[in-house]
Image (tube, coloured by chain):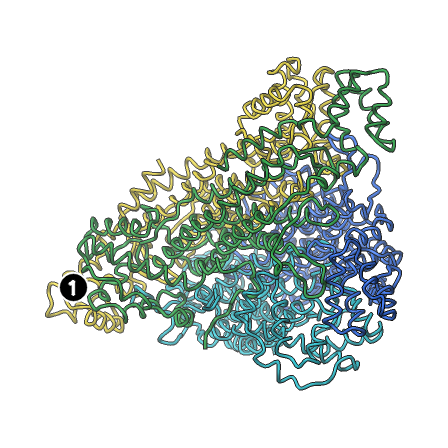
Chain colours: A green, B cyan, C blue, D yellow
Amino acid sequence: MTPSVDLGLLDPATGSAAAAISDHAYAAAMVDVELALVRALVAVDAAPERDEGWATDAVDADALAVGARASGNPVIPLLAQLRRAAPPEVAEVLHLGATSQDVLDSATMLVAARTRQRIDAALTPVLAGLAALADRHRATPAVGRTLGQQAAPTVFGLRIAVLLDGVRRAAQHLDALELPAQLGGSVGTLAVLSDLLGVQRADQVRRRFAEELGLAFRPTVWHVERGPVAELGAALAVLIGALGRLGLEVAQGTRAELGELELRLGADEGGSSAMPQKHNPVPAILLVAAARRAPGLAATLLGAQLALDDRPPGEWHAEWQPLRELLRLALESAVLAAEVVAALEADPGRLTGHLDDGHGAVHAERAQWALVPHLGRARAQELVRAALGARDFVPALLASLADQPEAADRVRAVTDPRTPVGLAGPMIDAAVGSAR
Amino acid sequence: MTPSVDLGLLDPATGSAAAAISDHAYAAAMVDVELALVRALVAVDAAPERDEGWATDAVDADALAVGARASGNPVIPLLAQLRRAAPPEVAEVLHLGATSQDVLDSATMLVAARTRQRIDAALTPVLAGLAALADRHRATPAVGRTLGQQAAPTVFGLRIAVLLDGVRRAAQHLDALELPAQLGGSVGTLAVLSDLLGVQRADQVRRRFAEELGLAFRPTVWHVERGPVAELGAALAVLIGALGRLGLEVAQGTRAELGELELRLGADEGGSSAMPQKHNPVPAILLVAAARRAPGLAATLLGAQLALDDRPPGEWHAEWQPLRELLRLALESAVLAAEVVAALEADPGRLTGHLDDGHGAVHAERAQWALVPHLGRARAQELVRAALGARDFVPALLASLADQPEAADRVRAVTDPRTPVGLAGPMIDAAVGSAR
Amino acid sequence: MTPSVDLGLLDPATGSAAAAISDHAYAAAMVDVELALVRALVAVDAAPERDEGWATDAVDADALAVGARASGNPVIPLLAQLRRAAPPEVAEVLHLGATSQDVLDSATMLVAARTRQRIDAALTPVLAGLAALADRHRATPAVGRTLGQQAAPTVFGLRIAVLLDGVRRAAQHLDALELPAQLGGSVGTLAVLSDLLGVQRADQVRRRFAEELGLAFRPTVWHVERGPVAELGAALAVLIGALGRLGLEVAQGTRAELGELELRLGADEGGSSAMPQKHNPVPAILLVAAARRAPGLAATLLGAQLALDDRPPGEWHAEWQPLRELLRLALESAVLAAEVVAALEADPGRLTGHLDDGHGAVHAERAQWALVPHLGRARAQELVRAALGARDFVPALLASLADQPEAADRVRAVTDPRTPVGLAGPMIDAAVGSAR
Amino acid sequence: MTPSVDLGLLDPATGSAAAAISDHAYAAAMVDVELALVRALVAVDAAPERDEGWATDAVDADALAVGARASGNPVIPLLAQLRRAAPPEVAEVLHLGATSQDVLDSATMLVAARTRQRIDAALTPVLAGLAALADRHRATPAVGRTLGQQAAPTVFGLRIAVLLDGVRRAAQHLDALELPAQLGGSVGTLAVLSDLLGVQRADQVRRRFAEELGLAFRPTVWHVERGPVAELGAALAVLIGALGRLGLEVAQGTRAELGELELRLGADEGGSSAMPQKHNPVPAILLVAAARRAPGLAATLLGAQLALDDRPPGEWHAEWQPLRELLRLALESAVLAAEVVAALEADPGRLTGHLDDGHGAVHAERAQWALVPHLGRARAQELVRAALGARDFVPALLASLADQPEAADRVRAVTDPRTPVGLAGPMIDAAVGSAR
């Protein structure tokens, strides 16, 4: 009987990709960590060099999960399994000088590093797709909305450029984080290793260990200094949030009443158990759901910094599952975003058409400022206020400018949707350029 | 290949008990919900009565997890599986009038109700054990500590009584929560069911449906009004916190420097991967870890209330996993607490001995107030302050009272650890009495 | 120079009402608590009865704030101020047997009780207004939306009834919470009071103390058992969330593209610093903002349960500001909701008009089920699917039913917006009835 | 009557320093932002150069707070006040092209930049003090503790070095964050400014604006892309957490039962309202309290990323107060940490003495590994296990090694507290070196 508790039933934001952050992936990373330590010992002649074939299939993840309960962590049962499987001379040096936390912390960072690579790969088409979309709609007039209300004209490409910029910066921020290896031994001093090999060789071992794992080397142990975990959690939450905003915009834009966006999903996606006509923007919805969950998980990691002693009495254990969830949600969000971007179409007709919803009132700000140089601020405000009271704003305003042909021309210009909108162009260029 | 992502490796607070909140348990509850609806239809003669044997093993939870990704929830693939397995005349009426959310919400409440029963069962020995411990130590003198510092004498039984009271009240609060069934159909109106059966029979169906499930009946649909979930999450977090405090106290009290508590665990529990002498108070540590995780999860549920429309666009999906985690952590915390209470021993010698750590300074408050009726406030403060400067507080204070035999007697009384400590007795009685 | 840090500039959800939860209100409540203790002592003849006029203006809240920094809490400087102002024979017994935490905990619960009364008062017109709105629109056809998409017909009154039900239940839940007084002395034993007055009179004092404050009496001290605070925080967050949903619905419904709702605010509300035509639904926006802040604050309170010893080393201090913020946000949300409800108008034309946005596809579910008894499930699905491919769903479906007049009649009935929608009526009655 | 709601009574972590983040500081920063925009306009000849003296005292922060309620933000009433105070030709161009959010976002970043400088200044003695302490105790033997239990010998200097490293890295991370200016106009396009001045000069204005404020320039508007705020919030929370750990360690180490640390506070600090002998480690406690509050606040900021449209409908408003609180808590934590470090003394006698609490069992791991080369793993484990059963571990182990003089020598060496402990030295050097 499997102790399996979670198949992903309630976490449909999981998908095949997130097998990358399954318990099997963690178990494999823990084995990699133990092997890296052996290799680092080999490098200083403290262990014999042996083929590592024995380690394949040495681990039974189900049994680990059961054993983790009594020991308080999965490394203790893992070691028992590995020692049984390893050649005696390797078993002898396995885990030498290390403590459980060294193995689980390093394995976690290894899983994080591998997941980060997958995230970056999944984001490549997202960034490219958003860049292309921003570029394509650099001159598609749209209604800018603030506090939920129609506010002033913009171009659809700018809205996408802003989204793009957020995702790109969040990914860059995540990529810039240092993911360190951990090797400190029982209380962080590496005393046993130093006793056995001398201080210098022990130091070489910890450096080589990090190198073998492709993780950063930290000269000071971080068993109880959880900045790396807290910062990683926060960076993942920021990225999940940036991608969640894509989901939110798409879920809103595909509403029938707006109709600015369409999500062309496969026939088997987005159906309803009740309504035959429904095409639910499922990946957009799941992006939002992921982003609603991330802050609480990140908060747990930020709070887990507050730990006593030389290794934490419980706060470390509290990190494991939330960090894993954040890694999973970040990778799955990247995958979902790629699906969304691939399926996303904007409807220029609906985008531009909404400019007329308010009978031209959306042009009031630019029209008013266009009048200021001609009429002064007070008179401009007065005419605009009067025209806002009429049925159609622009014609009414123009009518009141019958004796001001220059001012009327200026109003005509700034209320024409074809007129370029401020710095939208350069902003789009900047966002698109940086994403390449 | 199984899509399983979580065996409990990183959630050692899972254990066998929490299979109760596994994906298999959710899948089974969803089947129970669909069957309850059929039974409710049978009751109004809208479906034929059939043996329900077909439903056993009708569901493949692994496949559900895969299918949930495309549809956005596990009910859609579940229905497909059930319809294949059911007799045609049952397949015809399966899910009649319901929407996915009806099934998942009701199944979630069913899992919650079942888990609550298990929590209550697991807490029975916890409450009894704490009550016995409080009672046993109703006169065991101990140092009361505030802001981390030794403050004034107390009895150990009161500390336990306070813990007990917290756990009991949190459990009671959880038990008092209404766990409602959900049945509203696609947009909450039960229109289809009413169209087919008439309003009155449709109303009977939803009442009978709740009855069949043993859940509360709510006359108004709560698809988008998530009070039941938010309140459940908060109540679980309060209970997890109350139990976490037990873990925190035990982890602190078993520190060698305090040595007030001992946790007599099995030989295979609490070992270290590095240190042969270690006996880690693993269940106490895991209680703390659970309590550090609960607030972030509860916050997600509180935030998920903020949803638009007639069913939520993402916030509902964001609830599933955090609520499940809270149920799992609450049940496991109850189980861990039972282990802790069963293994817990208090050391009266160490408890009382710490009264002397500060050379009697811990008696200063009571001694000072004992003097006030005899000497007035100012003089009492003066003598106490002077005695606090001496090596041993009580002898120094008594020495300064050479000519005040009554006052000295009073000081002797209130600084004698055998003197009853205030209302500790009645407080312990109250807490112990309520827990029975 | 005032040490004032917060005038409400960044918390515009504050308003005049929330002076109720200002530092002055807390200072006043602390004075009330110290006076209640004196009165309780008078009741057992342990203090002389005196006029309490001396306490008016005895406290300088600014100075308290400065003093709170060095002492770690505001009660220590408060006591110094009160002792200076009181008649000597009252000064003598002020705070007798109490500790700072007794005073601040009781004052906090007093502020909470007073705020809860104000919340209830502010909610009275909210519940009445929503009930009237639900009732008025019990037959106003509207589009039900799920996952952001148009789903099936509903009535607007049901949407409001669901909102109403959520607010009512959240308020009821808050009202049901026990707000206890705290009186335990330095380590919770009431030892000093018992030493001075005997156990029985000390017990009378703590009961009378709670009575004087109009707070609940708890037989066991709760210095370190923070259920009352955690549960209060969660109940406030649930209420803020329920009210936030009103804001969210209004902010969405007043979007020009939906146009289902209108918020008729005063001329000076909702203007923009840039756009002359803007009428921002400011109170709705502020309701949403409050609801976005509440979960993080509640999480802090839930986490603060996890405290050591007989009084908490830091976690208690961490509660003060978040609980105050939640009280403030809850009261202000109630006030904002009253403004929203007073200004809210629904536009039946726009509400019903949106049923046509999808050319009748919104009727597909009910139409399909109307056909099932006549044509069987498979044939019904087939015809509906075909009609969904046509330009206009209902006419196309009816055309395909040329030879099935009864089925066609049934389709006509269930797609007529004037046909009652399922159990919407009884649900509205239930919600409206409970709110009265 | 002042609308002041918060004097700092419940936020004693406020103190004089945090006036830096008061509403007055925000109001001043908003004025600086409006002036920077005028100066940027002057630079492109779009406004006349004028003395800025008029702006001093132009703003009444109390009135702003009242006005902010109706408008939904404080910029609208601010502008009215400034326009009344400014010379007419300046009033004419004030706020030109900007929107409220430009001003408040830029002012927030200005407050953040100023606060960051103060934090860095406050941290200088913290880093120096911790470095000196780590250095001073590089060879002070101490008990390393894991999961709350005595585990293996370490040196006290390493514990401090780890703390130091955490604070330094967190501060560095905060310093590396880009704090951008915001200038986008009503919907982020800067359309009005571009209409009036042309695209090129408008672009110059926004670059100059950022320069005038000393903030970073972002080529794309970030009205709705809240990475800068979310990342700032997270970085502040990480720093508050790293400093909170200092508080936690000091609160624990100053417990009488450990007695490893002492906090030499002023006579007026740390007293109790009840207990004459109490010296509460108030600044340590307040550090812990701050760190318990930060995660919930940061979670709100992470969640506020999820906003619709071109400017957020509520989520922006939800950011203001939590970000301000985080800035305040971070600065105050730095100030508190400086107080703690200045007052902190370690007691080498108590630190080293605890090595004997467990009768030498703390040496078991190193002793066992010292035997492995001589006796092999199995025999080493056996002897160590046997010796752990004896009263005193080291003598018992040595007795069992009577015929193994070399092994016994090795055991003597590794159990001698004067023997250097592993890589503690190099780790301390690294942490101390980096902090300089």
Asked which secondary structure carries label 1, the reply is helix
From the image, tell me which residue sits under label 1: D373
Image-based side of C377 in relation to A182, left or right: right
Residue shown at the point (55%, 63%) measured from the top left: B241
Residue D35: image location, x then y, percent: 63, 22
Q: Is C295 placed left or right of B160 in the picture? A: right
Which residue is drawn at the image coordinates 85% and 66% (left, top)? C402
Label 1 amino acid? Answer: Pro
Q: In this view, does D61 lie above or below C189?
A: above
Q: From what the image shows, is residue D157 above or below residue C3?
A: below
| Extreme-front residue of the structure | C403
- Residue nearest the observer in this picture, D332 or D280: D332
In the shown orientation, is residue B12 left or right of residue D50?
A: left
Q: In this view, does A255 lie above or below C397?
A: above
Q: Nearer the viewer, residue C67 or D418?
A: D418
Figure quadrant of residue A94: bottom left
Judged left or right of residue D126, residue D324 is: right
Query: The disc numbered 1 marks a residue on which chain?
Result: D
Instruction: From the top left corner, tell me how far across and down residue A226 is, in percent.
Output: 42, 51
Q: In which quarter of the image is the N terminus of chain A?
A: bottom left
Residue C372 percent location from the top left of the image: 77, 72
Is residue D132 depicted above or below B116 in this figure? Answer: above
Whether residue B123 is visible to the viewer of this picture, yes or no, is: yes
Regarding residue C44, the answer to whether it shows in the image is: no
| Front residue of B217 and B294 | B217
Give coordinates of residue B430: x percent, y percent. Answer: 62, 73
Q: In which quarter of the image is residue A417?
A: top right
Mark 1 neighbour class, 10 Å CA radius: few under 14, some 14 to 19, many 20 or more:
few
